[in-house]
Image (spheres, rainbow, N blue to C red):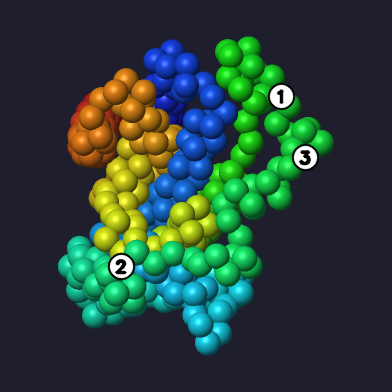
Amino acid sequence: MKKYLGLFAFLLVIYAVLLAADPAARSAYNHFNLARRVGMEGIVCIGAGLLIITGGIDLSLGSVVGFSVALTVTLLRREDFAWQPFPAMLVVILIGGFIGLVNGVLVTKVRVQAFVVTLCGMFIYRGLTKWMTGDQVQGLSGQMQHVPSWDAWTRALYSNRDAWGLLKPVNYLLGQFGVEPIAVPVSLILFLFLVLTAAVFLHFSVYGRYFYAIGNNENAARYSGVSTDLYKILAYVLCSGSAAVYGILHVMQAQSATPTQDGANLELKAIAGAVLGGCSVRGGEGNVIGIVIGTTILVLLPNLSLMLEIPDFMEFIVIGSALLLGAILDEALRSRERVSLSLVSRVFHSILSLGK
């Protein structure tokens, strides 16, 4: 708990510095973009976090995002039969889940290391993306009026947001600090829904306990009667499925597919957000709230760098530093726990010896 409180305090400090750094940071436009990025990147961080808790890893997340973006645009651009948005989205999500299924089967049944499987997938799906788009930027033409844009969805949901009464307290509080009223992007709504679902799954269901048990000691979980292969495959399906959802949201925003850039380095951000939020790279440890905080920190830091006019390449330094810091803190906490357990064990044995 202390670790999460410390992370939350660090988040508040970053946000306070951001608001003080530049008046533009207080604008509704900047807050909307921040909320949109937290929502989008948070979705893949939740998927990556669930997988990391089981002791797995997925290096193909970014390529799956690029593939999902290209597939969505391709389906909507078809000249012979242009798909309607919702069937196309459903197909893309199912294919994303199928990719996770393939990864999970290769890891659990074929016994190929997860690092190797997903590293190969990273190249394969990026190659498929380039093949599907002809290695060219593919945009949605003006005739595709049936495709909902990001702003159109947001306006449809929040054209009369004050009537909902949901944002009034938030906007009043932000107004005390000179921050303009805000709207909430679709991605953040979806992210909060997934956060609630993941929290219930992980912390209030037996299946979530299976995830932790597998990450802590897979052999012990198997001997206890847990279908370890099934739940590991499920974790890979959820991880790749979240990448497909990100790809769809990206199409709603950009209305185009860029084969070399869509999803690039996103797997690093997803892993960094989960690890920074308290997920142990060894598995068996993590918290949904921690993942939310870690994701938000990773989104705020580049924005702070922008407001302070720090070069763009610093974003990658921030991501790498955050991931390294998370790993160091995780190891330090584990070492401290081992020392504490060893000390308790010695005291216990000493008491028993005195009793004899």
The one of 119 and 259 positioned closer to us in this rendering: 259
Residue bearing mark 1: 169
Asked whether 318 or 163 is in front, the reply is 163
Label 1 or label 2, whichever comes before in sequence order: 2
Mark 1 Cα-neighbour bin, 10 Å: few <14, some 14–19, many ≥20: few
Please, is residue 200 above or below residue 256 in the view? above
Q: Is residue 279 left or right of residue 85?
A: left
Residue 214 to residue 297: above or below: below
The picture places residue 321, in percent across and down from the top left corner, at 21, 34
> From this viewpoint, which residue is outermost toward the front?
142
Residue 160 is labelled as 3
Dot in front, 1 or 2: 2
| Marks 2, 3: nearer the viewer | 2
The quadrant where residue 135 appears: bottom left
Q: Residue at horizontal 25%, vertical 25%?
A: 310
Type of amino acid under label 1: Pro
Q: Is residue 293 visible?
A: yes
Residue 339 point in image, percent of width and height: 21, 31
Pointer 2: what residue? Answer: 136
Find numbered disc 2 in the image and state the secondary structure of the residue it sits on: loop
Cα distance between the residues tagged 1 and 2:
46 Å
Instruction: Please state, as top left, top right, bottom left or bottom right, where the C terminus lies in the image.
Output: top left
Q: Quarter of the image containing the N terminus?
A: top left
Tag of residue 285: none
Distance CA(mark 1)–CA(mark 3): 16 Å
The residue that appears at 31% across and 26% down in the rendered structure is 305
**Image vertical order of residue 220 relative to residue 32, above or below:** below
Amino acid of disc 3: Asn
**Outermost residue, right side:** 163
SS for dot 1:
helix
